[in-house]
Image: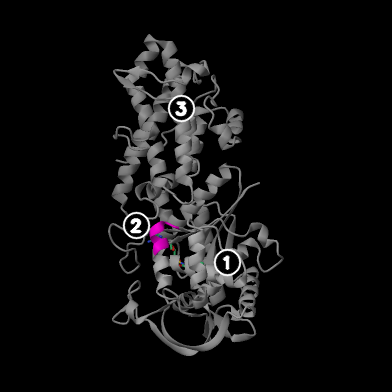
Amino acid sequence: MKRFFVTTPIYYINDVPHLGHFYTTLAVDVLARYHGLKREEVIFSTGTDENSQKTVNAAKKAGRDLEEYTDEMAARWKKTWDALGIQYSDFIRTTEPRHIKAVEKFTRTVLDKGDIYKGHYEGLYCVDCESFKQEGELVEGCCLEHKKPVEKRSEESYFFKLSRYGDELLNYYEKNPNFLCPESLRNEMIEFIKRGLKDISITRKGAEWGISFPDDPEYKLWVWFDALVNYLTVAGYGGSEDYKNIWPADLHLVGKEIFRFHAIIWPAMLMSAGIEPPRRIFGHGFFTIEGEKMSKTRGNVVDPVALSEKYGRDAVRYYLLREVPFGQDGDFSEARLIERYNSDLADNLGNLLSRITKICEDNFDGKAPEVDIEKTKKGFEFGGVGFLLGDGIVKNNWDHLEKYFLETSLRFDLYLGLVVGSGNQEGGGVSGLLNRYIDHSELWNLVKKDKESAKIITYQVLEHLRHIAWWLRPILPETSDKIFEQIIADEKTRAEELKKDFTEARKWGGLKPGTPVKKGPALFPKIK
Ligand code: MSP
């Protein structure tokens, strides 16, 4: 069985998840569901990055015991993903024994390779970024990202010989042109390496929290050196060699601000340890909120749970992935969410389902019309408008849609545009086309005048909705279920449908004539 191993970053626990964290996790959830529907074995890992100075600071600020605080926060992250319907298969915490074991083994391997040495570190550190800074990266002594003063550090430290891996990395990128996506980030990494890599300090002397450096526990490992190893821990590294059955991961999906850690430091660490790099790293863009950076001080942090409770989980999933091309930066606005919801989901898709199920109930005894499938493979022409329908267009769409899901592309926006489009945009989406098919054929009149033609059209719309339900399944799982419940109202037939793989599902005529159809509640009640 083919396997698909995909990861989110592991998140810091000094706060609870916001819309930005949800965005990455949602995209991974969509990919995991998609590969699951392709009947692959999916490993989807997410988790919490707990050995961070930020954790210590947050616990202190809250006047809490560190361990208690981390347990509670990790549980809150997990609970949030559960409430949002995220189907991870592994939730990794970096304070777990399996991870500590993996990090110890990994560090020792790199030590044995001769890639770690002791030296003196003198420089600047931003605790919020958990990373080292150069003078040139600061404004008035503050980190640009967090606008807070950085710390001056001068201490003994262990270093990782990152400088040794510049050429090897560049070679690797060249031989594996799709290793880093999108291309803009790949180019940035190449430029960065060409300017020269420096060795990096990977320990903190006397830190009170973190994973100890092997044989020298006075030193704690730099949180990134520990955190990146989480991807190997998930594969089972640190125990037997069986992790090689699972590793390398197919895809690390991360935000662009931590791309460099994943695209340069992590592969260099793996090269040093003699372990294959992951197959792909994809960096996506950042969301602002109504044009502003999301931050606690601005008080504009968006809670994905509250948002989903207000509009429905699928509406939020739809909006986030439809609105912005994955990889580019985007802006979140509740007004836009409502616009999209009303035009694409309520007026277009929802309306289509309710129209056609009503026609079935009113004219065909609540069943998919009895038709000769062969006759449903071609469209009709009404008032000079030809409708390309049937097996041809459906096949084309399946092919297109699969392309948008390739990990080098990840164009969820185009994918959704093709399926649902927009209600008032000619040519926008299959569901828009079907609504116009009903309009132009005046199906509600046609059933009275020419029942044979009406049967064919009704069947065609229902069968298209079956394909739509499959297409939407990885992105809008609840909506997909609801469509299936209405167009295949009988439980046994529905269970058989849902067992299909994509090869089976994509065949035209999968909806059996005579299948019970039942109009249900509106998929997306219009927001006034
Ligand atoms: N702990 C590190 C990651 C270690 S991975 C080995 C970390 N954690 S984080 O909590 O700060 O999460 C950062 C990630 O959250 C980003 O890379 C991105 O995936 C997501 N996002 C956080 N804010 C975001 C936006 N405003 N917009 C989009 N995604 C954002 O960094």
Could you give the CA–CA distance between mark 2 and mark 1, rounded to whole angstroms?
Answer: 27 Å
Q: Is residue 485 above or below residue 103?
A: above
Q: Which residue carries the number 2 mark?
A: 329
Secondary structure under the numbered disc 2 in the rendered image: loop
Q: Which residue occupies 45% across, 35% down?
A: 397
Q: Is residue 401 above or below residue 459?
A: below
Residue type marked 2: Asp
Q: Which residue carries the number 1 mark?
A: 230
Q: Which residue carries the number 3 mark?
A: 392
Q: Residues within 10 Å of mark 3 (few under 14, many from 20)?
A: few
| Residue 255 percent location from the top left of the image | 43, 61
User: What numbered label is drawn on residue 181?
Assistant: none
Q: Residues within 10 Å of mark 2 (few under 14, many from 20)?
A: few
**Nearer mark to the viewer, of 3 and 2:** 3
Q: What is the quadrant of residue 221 in the picture?
A: bottom right
Secondary structure under the numbered disc 3 in the rendered image: helix
Which quarter of the frame holds ligand 1? bottom left
**Nearer mark to the viewer, of 3 and 1:** 3
The magenta stretch is 181-187
Q: Main secondary structure of the magenta part?
A: helix
Q: Which residue occupies 48% across, 67% down?
A: 170
Q: Which residue occupies 61% across, 36% down?
A: 499
| Residue 329 percent location from the top left of the image | 34, 57
Could you give the CA–CA distance between mark 3 and mark 2, rounded to whole angstroms?
Answer: 35 Å
Residue type marked 1: Asn
Secondary structure under the numbered disc 1 in the rendered image: helix
Q: Is label 2 in contact with label 1 (beta carbons under 8 Å)?
A: no
Q: Earlier in the sequence, mark 3 or mark 1?
A: 1
Towards the viewer: 481 or 221: 221
Q: What is the quadrant of residue 357 in the picture?
A: top left
Q: Is mark 1 within 8 Å of ligand 1?
A: yes
Q: Earlier in the sequence, mark 2 or mark 1?
A: 1
